Image (cartoon, helix red, strand yellow):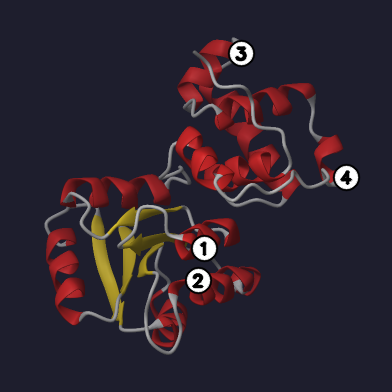
Amino acid sequence: MIRVLLVDDQALFRVAIATLIDLEDDIEVVGQAADGLQALRLVDETEPDVVVMDVRMPRMDGVETTRRLLAAGAARRTTPRVIILTTFTFDQQALRAVRLGASGFLLKDVDPDLLVAAIRTAHRGGSLIAPGQLEDIFEQRGREPAELPAEFSRLTDRERAVLAHITRGLSNAEIAEREFVSESTVKGHVSSVLTKLGLRDRTQIVVFAYDHGVMAPREE
């Protein structure tokens, strides 16, 4: 079962999402919080796999909650994935949460089936935002690429190729076909990239690539 914690200051919204999730055989709601402070306490108590969290809340918003939650990850047995909910398509607060390690963000009026699919995707470590879309959003801020960290030089040629494919939005199966290797081999390379660069998931790989100017050219 995928264990989910819902965090939103609107009780009616939380109940509606909980009711939706309860219809799924492989997902269960293990807790509900009205703000970030309560969410941090419940994460320790319920050990969720995925946190679905509003970006704007009283006392502590979704950005700061994401920062504290992921910063404390090393002290926990498991660190949950975070899905940010927002009202605005180009929400800079939601983008801040993604940079901090959230798996992505969704609009609060998202189709219910897409929300359920997003929970499953986040649980698998997948990205909720297409790399091209994420790049377009970040480019609006016009920031210069940062210097590559020393850890990047530790990547093998194959690992760099896998990183490039991820920034193009390819799945593990598609990468395996391009690189003429098995899908399990690709999974191993992805895991190695994440470990060497200190990243959590594919979304962070794309953010890293954009921030450091190593996004692969988009395919026509």
Closer to the camera in the image, 202 or 4: 202
Indicate the secondary structure of the residue bearing disc 2.
helix
Q: Nearer the viewer, mark 4 or mark 3?
A: 4
Query: Is residue 190 shown above or below 78?
Result: above
Q: Which mark is residue 97?
A: 1
Relative side of 182 to 162, left or right: left
Q: Earlier in the sequence, mark 4 or mark 3?
A: 4
At label 3, the amino acid type is Glu
The residue singled out by tag 3 in the image is 179
- In the figure, 183 relative to 148: above or below? above
Identify the mark nearer the N-term, 4 or 2. 2
Q: Quadrant of residue 196?
A: top right
Q: Please state which amino acid type lies under the numbered disc 4.
A: Ala
- Counting residues from the start of the chain, the first of labels 1 and 3 encountered is 1
Instruction: State the separation of the CA atoms marked 2 and 1.
Output: 5 Å
- x, y percentage for residue 110? 22, 52
- CA distance for labels 2 and 3: 37 Å
Say whether marks 2 and 1 touch (CB < 8 Å).
yes
Measured from the top left, where is residue 58 in percent x and y?
A: 38, 87
Answer few, some or many: residues within 10 Å of disc 4's Cα (few below 14, many 20 plus, some between 14 and 19): few
**Disc 1, disc 3: CB below 8 Å?**
no
Density class for disc 2 (Cα within 10 Å; few <14, some 14-19, many ≥20) is many
Question: Up-down: is 138 above or below 88?
Answer: above
Q: Residue 23 got which mark?
A: none
Which amino acid is tagged 1?
Answer: Ala
Secondary structure beneath disc 1? Answer: helix
Give the numbered dot on residue 63: 2
Residue 150 - label: 4
10 Å neighbourhood of mark 3: few (<14), some, or many (≥20)? some
